[in-house]
Image: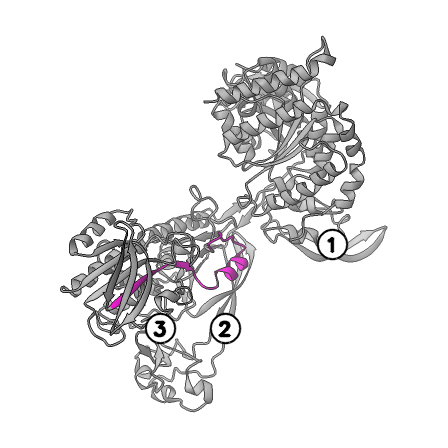
C-alpha cells in the first residue's frame, strides 16, 4: 500500500492555526504512508498539478488530502484524479482540517493535534477503500405525466415541444382539471376557459403527446431513466378510432338525470356523455354505473343512433406497460368535503350554501344558469350574498392547519363578480386574514373593497334558515360585536386537500407525503420540483396549495428538469451503494423491510457452498434504486451487506485509529 | 456573538485540566477523546457552517462522516468506547427530515435501545449521547459540542471509570442479543 498525504495551507486559513508542516511530518509515521507534502492552495491549478505529479512519481495507490470540507472539494479532487492520473477516483479521502479544525480552534497546539488525528483517521479509512466504478445507465427518453390539469398539460407541452414523447394520463374523461371549471382568473379577470382550452387542444394536437383519459397508474417499478409503468385505461364503451364526436348519442340517451360532475351537481347529464363541450378528447364515454344497457341490458339507443357504429358495450379495461425515463406527478387537489365537518353551516342541508367552485359554475356563461347569478333553491337572484373564507383552512380542529393560498384572492374575485352582475346586491366577506401576496393581487383586493364588498373580520359560527333566506352569525372581531347577516346565498371558500388516492399513488411511486398529505419535494428551497426518488418530479398543487401562475411556473420548472435529463441521455450511477455478499446472506429479509427505496429484494440464487451446488434465497441490491444510505448494512444480522465507500471495515479502522 | 459560549468553552477546558492535574502532575493535562458520528447531510454540514461562521468550541471532538445516522452500527459505538474514547456522540437529521427518508428513525431506535442497554449494565449516562442537529443549526452544533465536552470532562477519563469499563467489557454479548432491535417497521 502506497498512501500519499497532501496537507493544504489554504493560504493562512489552515496554516494560521495548524502547523501544516508538522501534520505532514506526522503523517509519514502512519502505516502505509510513503509520501507527504504541503501545498499553498491544493485546489488551484498548480496545486492539483503537484498532487497529480506526486501520485505518478511515487506510484501512489491511495491519496489523503487534508484541506477543506469534503462537501466543498471532494468532487473536485475526484475529478482531478480520474482525469489526470491512472488512479481510481474513489481511492481518495479528505481530512476536514479547515471548517472542522483551523476555523473553530484558536490554539495552535490543539488545532495541530486535532489535524494530525483527522489525517490519521482519513489514512485509516483510505487503507480500506476499494476501486469503485460508475456506470452510465441509459435514459428512456419518454415522460409520463400523471394528471391532466393545467400543471400536467403545461409540463407535457413543454417536454413535448423539446421533442420528447409524453404520455399524459388523466383519470377523468377529459383533461383540463379544475382550471377549466373556473369562470375567470384573478387578478386580470381573463376568461379561464379561454386560456385553458387552447392549451388542451394544443396538447391533443401535439404529435409528441399521447393523452390517455380515464386512465390510472396501476403499478410502477424501476428507477430514474427506466421506470416500467403499468397503466389501466378504463373501458369507455366507445371506439375512439371510429367516433367522430358528433354528439347525437348524448341527445338521444334516455338517462338524463345524473348530476353533472363538471357543473358540481348544479345541472344534469346523460349516461353517455362528454363532461363539457370543449372536452379533450372530444368524444363521449358511457358511465357504466348509470347506463341502462350496461346495467340491465335493455336500451341500446346510442348504438342505434350512432352514425359511425362506434358504440362498444363489450368494451373492457386495457392494461398496458410502457417504459418511461421520468415521471411528473401533477395530480392536483380536491376541495375539502365541508359537509361532514361543518354541522353549524347545515352540513349540506341548505341548497343555497354553496362552495366556491359551485359559484364558479353559476357565474360562468356556459354554466347551469348561463352566467346569471341565481341561487340553486328557487333560481332567484340573491340580493345579499355572504362569502365565508377559510372553511377548513387554517383550522386544525375542523379541517387542515395550512393556508390554501388561493382562496383570499378568489373570494375577492367572487365578491367582485357578484357585485358586477348584481349591481344592487350586497356582499359580505367573512375573513380571518386577507393574504394577497402576488403581482397585482393586493391592488385587486383594494378594487373589490372599492366595488363595495363589506369585509368582516371573523368566522361565521352558525348558518341557519329564516324565511326564504339564511342567517349568518359571527363575531366582528375588530369591533367585538356579534354580527347577524340575513343572506340569500352563502359561498364557502373551502380548503384545498390532496386529490383522492394520493396516498396510494405515493406508495406506488415511493414518494413521500408531508403531514398534510401533499407530496414532499426534495428540498423546500433548492430542489422544489424534485422528489427524493430520483426521476420523479412534482408540479402544481400536488406539491402544496398554490395558484395558477405558480402552478404553471412549477410545471415549466419540472419540464426543464425532465428535458435536462433527457438531453443528457444517460445518468452516471453513484457507485457508493450497498453490496451483498451472498455467501453470508441467509435471506432473512431484515434488509428488505428496512430499505426505504425498495432497492432490496430476495432472489433464488445458484451458489456453490462446500463444493456443492445449492439453490437458496438471498438478497439482491437493485443498483438503480439504492441511494447508498447504509441502513440495511446495519440491519443485516449476518454481516452480508456492506456499504461501498463507507464500509464497516473503513469506519471501524477510523475508530481504531482515533483510539490509539 | 460567541463570547458567552467561548467563555463556557474556556471553562470546560479549565475544568478538564483541573480534573486531570491532581494526578497528571507535570505531564500534559488529560483531555477527553470524543468521537462524533455525523450524518453528511445535517450535522456534518452544520459543523461546516460553524466553521464558516468561525464559531469556537473545544478541540476534543473528532467528527467521523457517515452518509446517514442509520449507517452507524452499534458495534462502531461500542468499539470506540471500549478502545479508548471517553465519549461518543451520534448525530443525525431531525426526525422527519432524513435525507434518506427514514434512516434517522432507525438510528434513533437502534441507538436508544443500545444506550439504555449500556446504561442499564453500568455505563455512565452521558458517555454515549444521540443528538439531532440540522445543517443550518451551526449554533446548536457548537452548543452541543460545548456541553458534551463539559460533561465528559467532568466524568474524567474512561480508564478510571470502573463501572463503565465493566459494562463495556460485557457489552459484546448484549449487542449480539439485541441485534436488529428497533428495526421493525
Q: Residues within 10 Å of mark 2 (few under 14, many from 20)?
A: few
* Outermost residue toward the left in this view: A424
- Mark yes or no: residue A535 visible: yes
Please determine whether, in this image, residue B7 is positioned above or below residue A361.
Answer: above
> Where does label 3 land, which residue?
A349
Tell me the subunit letter for badge 1: A
* Outermost residue toward the top in this view: B26
Q: Earlier in the sequence, mark 2 or mark 3?
A: 2
Q: CA distance from mark 2 to mark 1?
A: 38 Å
Q: Earlier in the sequence, mark 2 or mark 1?
A: 2
Considering depth in this image, is A420 or A30 the residue closer to the camera?
Answer: A420
- Mark yes or no: residue A95 visible: no
Percent across and percent down for residue B64 are 63, 31
Residue span colored magenta: A489-516
Query: Magenta span has A498?
Result: yes
- State the SS at label 3: loop
Percent across and percent down for residue A341 are 42, 64
> Where does label 2 land, which residue?
A318
> Where does label 1 land, which residue?
A588
Pointers 2 and 3 in contact (CB under 8 A)?
Answer: no
Tell me the subunit letter for badge 3: A
Please determine whether, in this image, residue A470 is positioned above or below residue B116.
Answer: below
State which mark lies toward you, 3 or 1.
3
Horizontal side, residue A491 vs residue B32: left or right: left
Query: Magenta span has A611?
Result: no
Amino acid at each position: 500500500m502506497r498512501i500519499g498525504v497532501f496537507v493544504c495551507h489554504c493560504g493562512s486559513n489552515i496554516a494560521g492555526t495548524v502547523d501544516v508542516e508538522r501534520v505532514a511530518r506526522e503523517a509519514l509515521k502512519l502505516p502505509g504512508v510513503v509520501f507527504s507534502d504541503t501545498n499553498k492552495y491544493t485546489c488551484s491549478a498548480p496545486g492539483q498539478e503537484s498532487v497529480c505529479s506526486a501520485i505518478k512519481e511515487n506510484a501512489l495507490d491511495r491519496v489523503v488530502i487534508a484541506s477543506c470540507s469534503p462537501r466543498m472539494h471532494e468532487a473536485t479532487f475526484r475529478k482531478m484524479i480520474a482525469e489526470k492520473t491512472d488512479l481510481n477516483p474513489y481511492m481518495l479521502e479528505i481530512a476536514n482540517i479547515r471548517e472542522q479544525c483551523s476555523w473553530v480552534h484558536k490554539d495552535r497546539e490543539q488545532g495541530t493535534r486535532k489535524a494530525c488525528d483527522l489525517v490519521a483517521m482519513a489514512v485509516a479509512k483510505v487503507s480500506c477503500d476499494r476501486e469503485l466504478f460508475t456506470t452510465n445507465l441509459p435514459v428512456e427518453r419518454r415522460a409520463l405525466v400523471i394528471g391532466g390539469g393545467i400543471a400536467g398539460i403545461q409540463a407535457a407541452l413543454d417536454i413535448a415541444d423539446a421533442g420528447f414523447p409524453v404520455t399524459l394520463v388523466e383519470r377523468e374523461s377529459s383533461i383540463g382539471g379544475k382550471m377549466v371549471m373556473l369562470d375567470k382568473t384573478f387578478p386580470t379577470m381573463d376568461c379561464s376557459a379561454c386560456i385553458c382550452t387552447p392549451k388542451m387542444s394544443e396538447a391533443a394536437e401535439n404529435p409528441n403527446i399521447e393523452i390517455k383519459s380515464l386512465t390510472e397508474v396501476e403499478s410502477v417499478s424501476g428507477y430514474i431513466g427506466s421506470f416500467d409503468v403499468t397503466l389501466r385505461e378504463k373501458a369507455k364503451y366507445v371506439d375512439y378510432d371510429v367516433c367522430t364526436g358528433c354528439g347525437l348519442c348524448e341527445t338521444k340517451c334516455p338517462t338524463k338525470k345524473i348530476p353533472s360532475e363538471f357543473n358540481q351537481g348544479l345541472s344534469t347529464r346523460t349516461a353517455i356523455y362528454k363532461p363539457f363541450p370543449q372536452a379533450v378528447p372530444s368524444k363521449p364515454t358511457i358511465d357504466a354505473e348509470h347506463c341502462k344497457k350496461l346495467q340491465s341490458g335493455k336500451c341500446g339507443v346510442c348504438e342505434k343512433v350512432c352514425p359511425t357504429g362506434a358504440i362498444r358495450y363489450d368494451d373492457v379495461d386495457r392494461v398496458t406497460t410502457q417504459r418511461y425515463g421520468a415521471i411528473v406527478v401533477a395530480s392536483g387537489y380536491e376541495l375539502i368535503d365541508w359537509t361532514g365537518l361543518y354541522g353549524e353551516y347545515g352540513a349540506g342541508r341548505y341548497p343555497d350554501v354553496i362552495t366556491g367552485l359551485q359559484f364558479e359554475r353559476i357565474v360562468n356563461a356556459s354554466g347551469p344558469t348561463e352566467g346569471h347569478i341565481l341561487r340553486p333553491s328557487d333560481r332567484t337572484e340573491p340580493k345579499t350574498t355572504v362569502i365565508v373564507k377559510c372553511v377548513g383552512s387554517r383550522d386544525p380542529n375542523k379541517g387542515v392547519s395550512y393556508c390554501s393560498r388561493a382562496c383570499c384572492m378568489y373570494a375577492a374575485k367572487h365578491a367582485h363578480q357578484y357585485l358586477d352582475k348584481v349591481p344592487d346586491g350586497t356582499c359580505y366577506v367573512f375573513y380571518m386574514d386577507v393574504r394577497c401576496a402576488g403581482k397585482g393581487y393586493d391592488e385587486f383586493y383594494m378594487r373589490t373593497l372599492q366595488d363595495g364588498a363589506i369585509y368582516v373580520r371573523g368566522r361565521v359560527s352558525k348558518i341557519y334558515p329564516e324565511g326564504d333566506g339564511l342567517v349568518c352569525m359571527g363575531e366582528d372581531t375588530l369591533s367585538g360585536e356579534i354580527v347577524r347577516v340575513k343572506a340569500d346565498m352563502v359561498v364557502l371558500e373551502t380548503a384545498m386537500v390532496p386529490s383522492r388516492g394520493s396516498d396510494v399513488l405515493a406508495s406506488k411511486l415511493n414518494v413521500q407525503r408531508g403531514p398534510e398529505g401533499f407530496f414532499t419535494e426534495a428540498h423546500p428551497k433548492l430542489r422544489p420540483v424534485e422528489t427524493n426518488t430520483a426521476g420523479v418530479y412534482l408540479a402544481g398543487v400536488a406539491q402544496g396549495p398554490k395558484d395558477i401562475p405558480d402552478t404553471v411556473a412549477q410545471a415549466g420548472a419540472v419540464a426543464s428538469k425532465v428535458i435536462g435529463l433527457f438531453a443528457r441521455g444517460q445518468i452516471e450511477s453513484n457507485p457508493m451503494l450497498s453490496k451483498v455478499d451472498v455467501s453470508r446472506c441467509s435471506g432473512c429479509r431484515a434488509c428488505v423491510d428496512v430499505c426505504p427505496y425498495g432497492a432490496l429484494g430476495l432472489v433464488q440464487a445458484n451458489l456453490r457452498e462446500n463444493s456443492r451446488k445449492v439453490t437458496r434465497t438471498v438478497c439482491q441490491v437493485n443498483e438503480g434504486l439504492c441511494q447508498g444510505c447504509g441502513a440495511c448494512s446495519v440491519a443485516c444480522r449476518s454481516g452480508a451487506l456492506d456499504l461501498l465507500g463507507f464500509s464497516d471495515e473503513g469506519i471501524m479502522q477510523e475508530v481504531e485509529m482515533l483510539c490509539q | 456573538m460567541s463570547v458567552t459560549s467561548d467563555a463556557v468553552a474556556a471553562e470546560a477546558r479549565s475544568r478538564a485540566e483541573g480534573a486531570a492535574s491532581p494526578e497528571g502532575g507535570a505531564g500534559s493535562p488529560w483531555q477527553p477523546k470524543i468521537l462524533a458520528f455525523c450524518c453528511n447531510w445535517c450535522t456534518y454540514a452544520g459543523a461546516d457552517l460553524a466553521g464558516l461562521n468561525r464559531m469556537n468550541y473545544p478541540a476534543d471532538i473528532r467528527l467521523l462522516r457517515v452518509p446517514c445516522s442509520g449507517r452507524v452500527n452499534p458495534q462502531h459505538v461500542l468499539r470506540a468506547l471500549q478502545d479508548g474514547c471517553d465519549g461518543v456522540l451520534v448525530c443525525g437529521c431531525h426526525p422527519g427530515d432524513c435525507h434518506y427518508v427514514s434512516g434517522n428513525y432507525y438510528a434513533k431506535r437502534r441507538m436508544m435501545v443500545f444506550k439504555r442497554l449500556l446504561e442499564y449494565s453500568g455505563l455512565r449516562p452521558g458517555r454515549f449521547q444521540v443528538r439531532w442537529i440540522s445543517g443550518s443549526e451551526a449554533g446548536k452544533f457548537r452548543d452541543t459540542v460545548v456541553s458534551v465536552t463539559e460533561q465528559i470532562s467532568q466524568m474524567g477519563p474512561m480508564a478510571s471509570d470502573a463501572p463503565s469499563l465493566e459494562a463495556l467489557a460485557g457489552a459484546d454479548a448484549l449487542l449480539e442479543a439485541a441485534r436488529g432491535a428497533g428495526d421493525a417497521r
